[in-house]
Amino acid sequence: MRNISETIGINSKKIGDGHPIYLMADLGLTNGGDLERTYKLIDIAAESGVDAVKFQMIEPDKLLGDKTVEYTYPTLNNGPKTENMYEMFSGLNYSEDQWFMIAEYVRSKNLEFICTAHVIEAVPLLEKIGVNIHKICTWSMTHKRLIQEIGKTGKPLMLDTGMFTTTSLSRTLDWHSESGGRGALILHDFHTANHKQMNFRSIPFMKESFGYPVGYTPQGRDNDMDFMSVGLGVNILEKRLTVDRAIPKNGHIKALEPDEFCEWVKRIKELESTLGFGSVLPTDDDRKSSEIFFKSLYLNCEIKKGDTITDAMLSARRPGDGISAILIDDICGRRATRDITKETKLSWDDLS
């Protein structure tokens, strides 16, 4: 296990156990390379109460060696759509000036600007923009020089697990830290509909094994898994946001629309508030109800003044506003101070 802090600081926010779940709106695909839509999505994210928005700096000219590769994805109303990957990514590209404008707008909304770097050339631009953390996706796990370049910035690394194993994750984190990187945020990630391969128990495992905050990055609209991850102790959660699921482009069908997204944030925060802390304590309502539902000591038989109280004379019955049944061993052996009828609730005045 790594001897490090479990808390990672991003700007004024702390991420880790004992701190609120860090919530991100994923706009990486749904912004569509359209500034007007991008600003609208940022506005929605800010109103929802998340901490950050996440983009992707893809730069397809540098990412793709083969520009003829096609990709098929589902759409809401038009069925499967096949698109040239280079053209698809080119539609998500922004100029350097536009990236600065987007980051500035994000910060004006008191949100953190987080951006996945798909190519090594993105790192210096993101440094110029002034990011507080760098991110890679699982498909960059073998890009050693990219990870080392991020490490040289001295900033934390956020990554999605996906294709990682325990061994390869450790190796990647070592590349980052040995290059000067400080801290990491690990997002549990998978690309399967097979429930038996989703491995949510890796969330507490990774927290224990690596000592870093761990989150979950869902690939779809199944909120139940997000809610389950809260119970497993995630420190970070993200969800994809779109202005309209019917947009016939990659990623929109799996995203939440504005009202759904705001409700998701609200529900996550409600569920987080139920986690409490590592101890066993009753609620205020339970304490109040205990006066009715706890049990007091009652007599099973008639007794005379001076009789010695025995276990056989006593029973425990509701309500719990008399001598508590927990004190039965202290009551046995005492003498009655008066004649007492059967089924009387004992009081301390009845005993010597």
Image: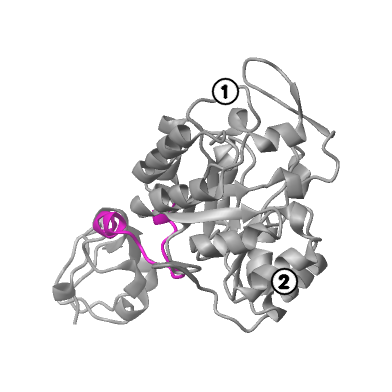
Quarter occupied by residue 266: top left
Of the pair 14 and 129, the residue shown nearer to us: 129
Seen in the picture, residue 1 relative to 245 is either above or below; the reply is: below
Q: Specify whether residue 8 is painted magenta.
A: no
Q: Quadrant of the N terminus?
A: bottom right
Determine whether label 2 and label 1 are within 8 Å by CB: no
Q: Residues within 10 Å of mark 1 (few under 14, many from 20)?
A: some
Look at 75% across and 56% down and name the residue there.
Answer: 140
Q: Is residue 332 visible?
A: yes
Q: Is residue 263 visible?
A: no
Tell me residue 306's x, y (percent): 20, 79
Q: Check disc 1 and report its element: helix, strand or loop.
A: loop
Of the pair 271 and 337, the residue shown nearer to us: 271
Look at 75% across and 69% down and name the residue there.
Answer: 172
Q: From the image, tell me which residue sits under label 2.
A: 148
Residue 171 horizontal side relative to residue 149, left or right? right
Quarter occupied by residue 344: bottom left
Q: Quadrant of the C terminus?
A: bottom left
Mark carried by residue 247: 1
Where are the magenta residues, as a range? 272-290
Q: Specify whether residue 289 is painted magenta.
A: yes
Look at 64% across and 41% down and name the residue there.
Answer: 219
Of the pair 221 and 231, the residue shown nearer to us: 221
Seen in the picture, residue 95 relative to 341 is either above or below; the reply is: above
Amino acid under disc 2: Gln
Q: Check disc 2 and report its element: helix, strand or loop.
A: helix
Tell me residue 225's x, y (percent): 60, 44
Of the image marks 2 and 1, the number of the one nearer the N terminus: 2
Look at 69% across and 69% down and name the residue there.
Answer: 149
**C-alpha distance separating marks 2 and 1:** 37 Å
